[in-house]
Image (spheres, rainbow, N blue to C red):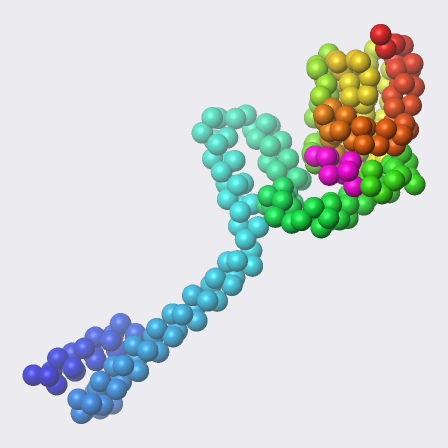
Amino acid sequence: MIRQYTTCMFRSLCHMMTLNYGSRGVPKGVTDLWVDIISMMVGTVMYALVLARITALVTHSRVSENVYKSRYDELCQYMRQYRIPGALRERAICHLASRYQGKWFDEKAILMELNEPLRREIISYNCSNLIKKHPVFKDANPLYLLELLDKLEFECYQPGELIIGIGTVGDCMYFIEKGDVEVASPGYTQILSDGSFFGELCVMTDITKRQANVRALTSCRLYSLSISSYEHVSKLFPKAMHGMETQAQQLLQNLGTSIE
C-alpha cells in the first residue's frame, strides 16, 4: 500500500514538472522513490526562488520607467473617461513626455530625504546650466545662489502654450533654462531665450497684474520663483537682487508704465 501511494505521488510530481522517467526508469524501491520525490521538490523550490529573484531584479531595475508607464496609462484612461478632445489629449501626453522623459521621479520627496548641504549641492548641480546662461548670476555670492536655487520650481511648456496671460494676477517670475518665448503687449513685442527671465514686474514692483502675454515658441524648460520665495531671498541678500530689479525698472519704462 505504501509503495502504491508513493509511486502515485512520484508519477504526479513527474507530470506536474513535465519529467518523464519512462516505463523502465522508475525507481523500484520505496526509499529510492522518496529520495527522488524530495530531490524534485527541493529542486523546484530552488528554481522558483532563483526565478523570483531574477524577476525582482529586472522589475526593480526599471522602477521609474514602470511608474511613468503607470502614470501615462492613468492619464490616458482619465482623458478617455471624460472624452477630452484629441488635440488636447495630444498636448497633455506631449507635456508628460517632455517633463519626465520616460522616467517618473518624485524629486521633492527624494531630495527631502537628504541633509540640507547635500540637497543644495545636488540642486546646484542640476541647475548648473541655468546659472551659466543667466548673466545676473555671474560672479554672484555662492550662498545667495544656493538659497535662490533651493526656492525654484521646475516647469515645462509646449510650443504655443500661454505661460502668462495679460491682466491675470502674477504670483511668480520665470527663468528660462532652455527654449524661446514671446512677450507681447500693446505696442511691445520681444523674443526671450536661454539666459533670460520674465514676469518679474509682479514680483519686484508694486504691480499686481501681468502687463503682457508670454507664449512658448518652442518646448521650454523654465524655473519659477514665487513672490514669497523672492522676498525671503531678498531679505537675506538684498544687494544680490539689484541686477534683476534694475532690469525690471527698465522694462517698466519700455512698457510706458510707472510704479505708484
Residue drawn at point x = 92 percent, y = 14 percent: 253
Q: Position of residue 19 (x, y in %)?
A: 29, 79
Residue drawn at point x = 63 percent, y = 44 percent: 112
Q: Which residue is more in the foreground, 84 or 193? A: 193
Q: Which residue is more in the foreground, 37 or 216? A: 37
> Which residue ends up furthest to the front in the rendered image?
236
Q: Quadrant of the C terminus?
A: top right
Residue drawn at point x = 50 percent, y = 40 percent: 73
Q: Which residues are magenta?
A: 146-153
Determine if residue 181 is in view.
no
Task: Indicate the quadrant where residue 13 lies.
Answer: bottom left
37 sits left or right of 237 in the view: left
Task: Indicate the quadrant where residue 52 lies.
Answer: bottom left
202 sits left or right of 242 in the view: left
Q: Position of residue 123 (x, y in %)?
A: 73, 45
Residue 8 painted magenta: no
Q: Which residue is more in the foreground, 249 or 215? A: 249
Q: Position of residue 247 (x, y in %)?
A: 90, 24
